[in-house]
Amino acid sequence: MKPFTTHVGKTVALDRANVDTDQIIPKQFLKRIERTGFGEFLFWDWARRDDGSPNPDFELNQPKARGASILLARRNFGCGSSREHAPWALEDYGFRVVVAPSFADIFYSNCFKNGMLPIRLSEEQVGELFHRVAQHAPYELTADLQSCTLSDAHGFSTTFEVEPFRRHCLLNGLDDIGLSLEYEAKITAYEQAHGIGI
């Protein structure tokens, strides 16, 4: 997993609350076994018309959203089913950071396991960021996991909280397998001592 320290990126605003995982990546696209290739189907029902052509009214299809790597959303982002494909699709599309007042618990956890940083801010702070996205084009934010700060070049700066263990894993690019491999020498010694795998 790619480590996350500091990320500077264009920000796109998705002015919707209670965005569930079936909207993030609809169920008909869950047939792949790889973690890649889901980005083109992100927000499919909103991003596409009935004939499959792009919906020009959808926020991510507008020219100012092109190349965005920070997603700004409203409360309860990632609710619904627990599918890990949701952060896979967001990451494959190019997002590294999602900012919202609140996230569904499982989605929040899955973001960290897939190298993305979900940032929880107050409703008021998120509202201010929506205002700034509309005011500045393009609008960039800097997310610094070392200092746990989120800032822009126009005077906005705030801190955010991340549990120490999750912060350690993301800073060092450690998913569940990576965490296990930190103990590889001890695991090998145990297997040799107990005749496992011989």
Image (cartoon, helix red, strand yellow):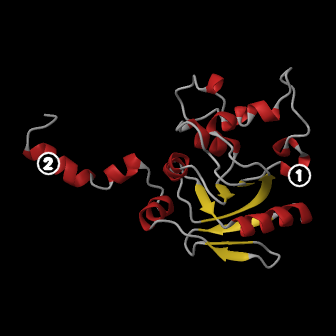
Give neighbour class at mark 2: few <14, some 14-19, many 20+ (Cα, 10 Å). few
Seen from this angle, which residue lies furthest top?
A: 51
Rendered view: 130 above or below 35: below
Q: On the image, numbered disc 1 is attached to which residue? A: 64
Q: What element does badge 1 sit on?
A: helix
Which residue is depicted at the point 46% across and 60% down? 166
Q: On the image, numbered disc 2 is attached to which residue? A: 190
Which residue is depicted at the point 83% across and 23% down? 52
Q: Is residue 137 visible?
A: no
Residue 167 in the image: state x and y as whole percent. Answer: 48, 64
Residue 110 in the image: state x and y as whole percent. Answer: 51, 47
Rendered view: 136 above or below 96: below
Question: What's the residue type where badge 2 is placed?
Answer: Tyr
Quarter holding the C terminus is: top left
Residue 139 in the image: state x and y as whole percent. Answer: 83, 63
Q: Is residue 157 visible?
A: yes
Q: What element does badge 2 sit on?
A: helix
The front one of 46 and 192 is 46
Which residue is depicted at the point 39% across and 48% down? 176
The front one of 196 and 119 is 119
